[in-house]
Amino acid sequence: MYSSTKHSALCVPAILLLVSLTIARTPPALSGTVLDSWNAGVPGLIIRVAPVDQSHEAKYATTDSIGAFRFATLASRAYVLDVFIGKKLLHRSVVDIQAQPRLVIKIAETH
């Protein structure tokens, strides 16, 4: 006779393994908010991320109405992150997206 208890006991570890493999394969993402000196979000800034190892081309995003940005899938781990207003560089940092997938970037001026 087949026991549903045995079946359930075998299914739980298998499901947990599948979930952990799915999470491990999810491409890394990077998101954040750019704030001014008054802690208000800054809209309309250009965010550029370029892999430190230059393995891929740079990607671009623009901050939204509350200063937020997001890069949904990134292939590398370390990126140079630049924040621009027009052609003027306001901020540059190196980001390890596995250690820091969510950023708050404070900038002193936007003009």
Image: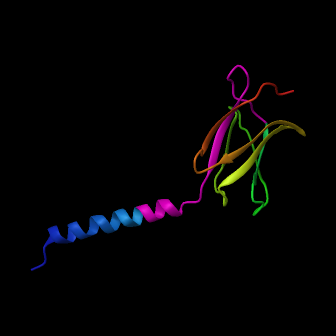
- Is 41 or 96 nearer to us in this picture? 96
Q: On the rendered structure, is 34 left or right of 102?
A: right
For this rendering, which residue is in front, 21 or 71? 21
| Magenta-span inclusion, residue 28 | yes
Q: Front-most of 51 and 10?
A: 51
What stretch of residues is rendered in magenta? 20-44
Residue plotted at (40% across, 66% down) = 18
In the rendering, at what x and y percent does residue 93 appear? 74, 41
Hey, which residue is sitting farthest bottom in the picture? 1
Relative to residue 94, is residue 59 depicted above or below? Answer: below
Q: Is residue 100 left or right of residue 54?
A: left
Q: Is residue 46 above or below residue 38?
A: below
Outermost residue to the left: 1
Q: Quadrant of residue 10?
A: bottom left
- In the rendered image, residue 77, in percent from the top left (x then y), is placed at 65, 56
Q: Looking at the figure, which quarter contains the N terminus?
A: bottom left
Q: Is residue 16 magenta?
A: no
The quadrant of the image that shows the C terminus is top right
In the image, what residue occupies the spot 73% across and 25% down? 36
Please name the residue shown 66% across and 57% down the image. Answer: 74
Question: Is 36 rendered above or below residue 78?
Answer: above
Q: Position of residue 108 (x, y in %)?
A: 78, 25
Residue at the limit of the structure toward the top, as seen here: 38
Point out residue 49 in the picture as x, y percentages from the top left corner. Answer: 75, 50
Answer with the quarter of the image where residue 17 lies. Answer: bottom left
Colouring convention used in this rendered image of the protein: rainbow
The mark total stands at 0
